[in-house]
Image (tube, rainbow, N blue to C red):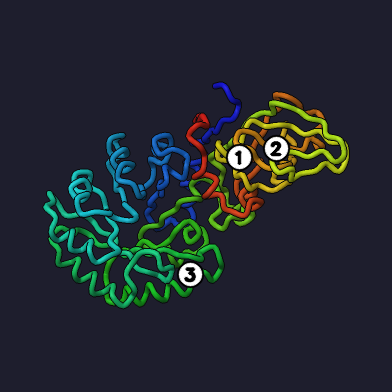
Amino acid sequence: MSRPIQASLDLQALRHNLEVVRRAAPRSRVWSVVKANAYGHGLDRVWSALGATDGFAMLNLEEAILLRERGWKGPILMLEGFFHADELPLFDKYRLTTSVHSNWQLKALAEAKLNAPLDVYLKINSGMNRLGFVPERVHTIWQQLKAIANVGQITLMAHFADADRPDGIDAAMVRIEQAAEGIDAPRSLANSAAALWHPQAHFDWVRPGIVLYGASPSGQWRDIATSGLQPVITLKSEIIGVQTLKPGDTVGYGSRYRAAGEQRIGIVAGGYADGYPRHAPDGTPVLVDGVRTGIVGTVSMDMLAVDLTPCPQAGIGSPVELWGNEIKIDDVAAACGTIGYELMCALAPRVPVSTR
């Protein structure tokens, strides 16, 4: 390892977070959502730590095949279904559950030559207006699916746009109940936020994502601070240089930061090519040698600068936590006007990753 920046994954925290979800939704089975390469953590690194799950949910066929090749024999849900009809033989071979959200998929299922029926998640448009059938069409689509020999068990599926708010699922639940009228089928509705905060939406299967990785579905750590959830990923580095600024000296590209007085800064091996957000403002939290401080100046491709005023003992080689147990990824994301999801998914391939 040449550069000191590295990410470490706490697999015990991942196992623990799955148990937190089970306690929150004790009567539901759990789809562990591992889309986007397990939210940037690396599917191949983390899936076995989630081996106590009831099923895995994802998007990419390649990732589903990887899980089968690694020995996972349980259910796999493809959240956006098949994108082309010629993928169905692979869905059949690897026994994948598909979502159905468009008319053409019904025709493709009816015409496919399969060895056995595929289980289907019928997607309801709950008002988010991404994928799914509007409520008034769901009963007809359900009847059409029941008539297709290639279709096995049918589950009703929906998603929530505002489940991080106390009343955030009320309107969506009205639409879902309208859609489900007269349909006797299992339901999978709850995302991370609904799994934690809306037990009326739990039903048969919950689909936690971000909470498994120890970040908040609302983007605010305080909302999950007492939940027992633990951060899984830590991004750390070291100080590789120190500068002493005089009043008026500037830092970084664009000279955005200007020292008001004499000030020591540390240069950290880590930048936007590693996945740290370039638009992070001055003061974005960081931990240097165990002391909380903030970044100064514009983040570069490979480096960023931190204020050493609160930690005068720090120098070259001092450890830096960019996010992890002490500096919550949600707090960094909030300072940058984004959410922890984006920072997780942006971790660059050049950053070495270890597990513990």
Cα–Cα span, label 1 and label 3: 30 Å
Q: Position of residue 152 (x, y in %)?
A: 19, 58
Pick out the residue farthest to the top.
2
Residue drawn 71% across and 41% down? Answer: 295
Q: Mark 2, residues whose alpha carbon is within 10 Å: few (<14), some, or many (≥20)?
A: many
Q: Quadrant of residue 29?
A: bottom left
Residue at disc 2, secondary structure: strand
Residue highlighted by disc 1:
324
The kind of residue on which mark 2 rests is Leu
Q: Are marks 2 and 1 in contact (CB under 8 Å)?
A: yes
Q: Give the answer, above or below, for where 321 lies relative to 345.
A: above
Q: Nearer the viewer, mark 2 or mark 3?
A: 2
Q: Give the answer, above or below, for where 314 lies relative to 282.
A: above
Q: Give the answer, above or below, for where 287 lies relative to 150.
A: above
Residue highlighted by disc 2:
287
Q: Position of residue 306 (x, y in %)?
A: 73, 37
The kind of residue on which mark 1 rests is Gly
Pick out the residue farthest to the front.
254
Left or right of residue 353, residue 287 in this image: right
Residue at disc 1, secondary structure: loop
Q: Earlier in the sequence, mark 2 or mark 1?
A: 2
Q: Identify which residue, 252 or 77, lies in the foreground.
A: 252
Q: Mark 3, residues whose alpha carbon is within 10 Å: few (<14), some, or many (≥20)?
A: many
Residue highlighted by disc 3:
169
The kind of residue on which mark 3 rests is Ile
Q: Earlier in the sequence, mark 2 or mark 3?
A: 3
Cα–Cα span, label 2 and label 1: 10 Å
Q: Earlier in the sequence, mark 1 or mark 3?
A: 3
Note whether residue 126 is visible. Answer: yes
Residue at disc 3, secondary structure: loop
Note whether residue 356 is visible. Answer: no
